[in-house]
Amino acid sequence: MAIDHLDGRLIVLLAREPRIGVLEASRRLGVARGTVQARLDRLQSHGVIRGFGPDVDPSALGYPVTAFATLEIKQGQGADVRAHLATVPEVLELHTTTGHGDMLCRLVARSNADLQRVIDRVVGFEGIVRASTAIVMENPVPLRIIPLVEQAAEDAR
Amino acid sequence: MAIDHLDGRLIVLLAREPRIGVLEASRRLGVARGTVQARLDRLQSHGVIRGFGPDVDPSALGYPVTAFATLEIKQGQGADVRAHLATVPEVLELHTTTGHGDMLCRLVARSNADLQRVIDRVVGFEGIVRASTAIVMENPVPLRIIPLVEQAAEDAR
DNA sequence: CGCCGACTAAGCATATTGCGCAGCGGATAC
DNA sequence: GTATCCGCTGCGCAATATGCTTAGTCGGCG
């Protein structure tokens, strides 16, 4: 779904100041409250905005180490491996990618030593042929969406 | 910061039903409103909960293609490359990782053809020696935090 | 034993929400 | 040209939530 300029401003506003409500947003955007409400409903029902879940920082929870693991899977074992990885809390996300029928997953751990435990648990499963892990040192660009929203809103102009 | 069982339940509740307010949360958890308010304040001030930003779906915005690019950087060019990548809206996140002074970034694009444009823009910068890209086909485990929160709350028990 | 921190329960003024209403363009179809 | 539709506005209403304060209770800890 395409978004227009007002949608873009609304999303950016909400991203920057999530605590504000519909009424405050309408004041900031200079439109009627009903308009903001209608736009929000539309954005949510169209799935552009999935929700407003709390943004939890794993490092504040005691998991300061992040890593990405590339997994090589034995043919035909994909579904089993997925189910296995879904049971590991430290697996924050999992993608299947082009390449060699591979998967890429994001892991967190309590320490570098703990990462070993996590990796052992991840790869300790029949069907995973090989895993190569890259530990994250810095995160210069944290997961963001604002620039893309602005781009999309601009395109619709 | 360690979280206790009530913190864990609160976070999970908010993650599952973000629209509920403090009062409703206190009803669901069976505790007083002031308690929920105090817990929330504490979680936020300690950075466990960074905020409640809208969860935007790039594919609904017209960017259905996701890819991960591993970048090899020329020595000493790290800072410049970071600044460059930060200007590309399609770069949703960027990490520096162990390995070969490498970086890993998440990209989105409007189509596979458009991905070529994005990659050209990403690597069209002096300082990037090589890039290898993996296109995401499926996302069996979307970015999640609930299992980790439950784990952390359990550990504190 | 006394203190302290956390939780409960209640109250109050204010702000926000969800909802419906009529009116008003601008764009579109005929 | 004109009828129609759609989105936005501005308003009002009752119901509800918020921010804040107070007082009382309970358990742990030095």
Image (cartoon, coloured by chain):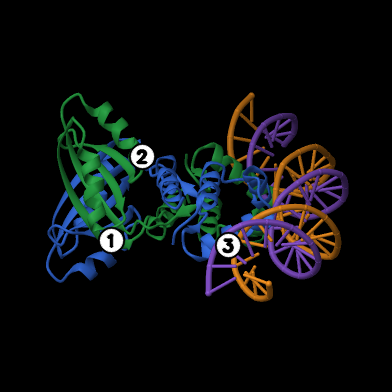
Chain colours: A green, B blue, C orange, D purple
Q: Secondary structure at mark 2?
A: loop
Q: Which chain does the numbered disc 1 sit on?
A: B
Quarter-of-image position of residue C5: bottom right
Quarter-of-image position of residue A21: bottom right
Q: Nearer the viewer, residue B121 or A52?
A: A52
Quarter-of-image position of residue B91: bottom left
Give the labeled residue for mark 1.
B85
Q: Nearer the viewer, residue D28 or A127?
A: D28
Give the labeled residue for mark 2.
B64
**Do the residues at discs 1 and 3 belong to one chain?**
yes
| Residue B101 at least partly seen | yes
What residue type is disc 2 on? Pro
Q: Residue at x 29, y 39 (%)?
A: A95
Residue A135 in the image: above or below residue C23: below
Q: Position of residue A14 (x, y in %)?
A: 54, 56
Q: Which chain does the numbered disc 3 sit on?
A: B
What residue type is disc 1 on? Leu
Q: Position of residue B42 (x, y in %)?
A: 55, 63
Q: Secondary structure at mark 1?
A: helix
User: Would residue B6 appear left or right of A77 to someone viewing this image?
Assistant: right
**Do the residues at discs 1 and 2 belong to one chain?**
yes
Give the crowd class for mark 2: few <14, some 14-19, many >=20 residues within 10 Å.
some
Q: Which mark is residue B41?
A: 3
Q: Position of residue D9 (x, y in %)?
A: 72, 53
What's the CA distance linking mark 1 and mark 2?
20 Å
